[in-house]
Amino acid sequence: MSSASFSGGAGSRRPLVIALAVIGAVFVILAILFFAGVNMGPLDSIGHSGKVHHGSHAIRGGLSAVIGIIAFAGAWVANRKAR
């Protein structure tokens, strides 16, 4: 019997778990900044069409929070399957 590692084991999912956790953290931080109303330069222009600027921070903040939570859930599921 050998102690060779098998593909698909816990080690192969580690980069995916780390990437999803980082993406989740970035989007949660973005959500906090959008909800706080911080002026973020180029990120402030995302989602604006013309001169309509009403309520877009709340929408972008909510969407960022949802994406962050989904990324954290994906990292948790991938980590759980790796065991």
Image (spheres, rainbow, N blue to C red):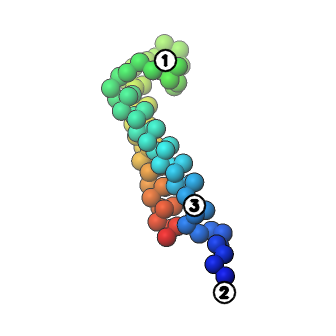
Q: CA distance from mark 2 to mark 3?
A: 25 Å
Marks 3/1 in contact by CB < 8 Å: the verdict is no
Amino acid type, mark 2: Met
Q: Secondary structure at mark 1?
A: helix
* Residues at marks 2 and 1, CA–CA distance in whole angstroms: 59 Å
Res. 45 visible in picture: no
In the visual, does 7 lie left or right of 59? right
* Label located before the other in sequence (2 or 1): 2
Mark before the other along the chain sequence, 2 or 3: 2
Q: Residues within 10 Å of mark 1 (few under 14, many from 20)?
A: few
In this rendering, the label closer to the viewer, 2 or 3? 2
Q: Which numbered dot is residue 1?
A: 2
The mark found on residue 41 in the picture is 1
- Upstream in sequence: badge 3 or badge 1: 3
Mark 3: amino acid? Arg
Q: Which residue is mark 3?
A: 13
Q: Residue at x 48, y 55 (%)?
A: 75
Give me the residue at 41% from left, 47% from top: 69
Q: Amino acid at mark 1?
A: Gly
Q: Position of residue 42 (x, y in %)?
A: 52, 19
* Position of residue 3 in the picture relative to residue 31 (left or right): right
The image quadrant that residue 37 belongs to is top left
Q: Are marks 2 and 3 in contact (CB under 8 Å)?
A: no
Is residue 77 in sight in this rendering?
yes
